[in-house]
Image: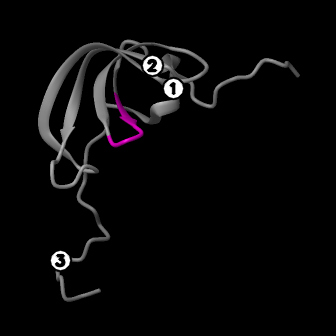
Amino acid sequence: MSNRKETVLDLAKFIDKGVCVKLSGGRQVIGTLKGYDQLLNLVLDEAVEYLRDHDDPLKTTDQTRALGLVVCRGTAVMLVAPTDGTEEIANPFVTQDPAVI
């Protein structure tokens, strides 16, 4: 056994590919992963931030803000997901009838 710590995530397969990063506090950034380290600090190029709703800060809107080259600090990273091969689906657990609880 080696004494070297390894990260749980293997982000090497996502280098130079699009990723979606959710950060603590509700921010969401999409960009091209250019680098990372064992502390999960991420370098994203051509990054775009999805702005949050003014009424509900936990929800994002379709409005975006171009950021360019960004370093996401590992302590703030909550989720890293590839943008290719994923799509948003409707929630199957939401009932259509509001009277049913």
Element under disc 1: helix
Q: Nearer the viewer, mark 3 or mark 2?
A: 2
Magenta region: which residues? 20-26
Residue 51 is left or right of residue 17, and the answer is left
Q: Is residue 49 above or below residue 2?
A: below
Which residue is at a point 85% across and 18% down the rendered structure image? 2
Q: Are marks 1 and 2 in contact (CB under 8 Å)?
A: yes
Could you say whether the residue bearing mark 3 is in a helix, strand or loop? Answer: loop
Q: Mark 3 packing: few (<14 Cα in 10 Å), some, or many (20+)?
A: few
- Amino acid type at circle 1 is Gly
Q: CA distance from mark 1 to mark 2?
A: 7 Å
Residue at 25%, 53% (x, y): give it. 89
Residue at the disc numbered 2: 42
Along the horizontal axis of the image, is 8 left or right of 97? Answer: right
Residue 5 placement, left or right of 74? right
Residue 62, relative to residue 55: is it above or below? above
Q: Which x, y percent locates residue 16?
A: 37, 12
Q: Which residue is mark 3?
A: 96
Mark 3 residue type? Gln
**Which mark is first along the chain, 2 or 3?**
2
Q: Between marks 3 and 1, how big is the CA–CA gap?
A: 39 Å
Does any portion of residue 57 appear in the rendered image? yes
Q: Which residue is mark 1?
A: 74
Q: Amino acid at mark 2?
A: Leu
Q: Residue at x 15, y 44 (%)?
A: 61
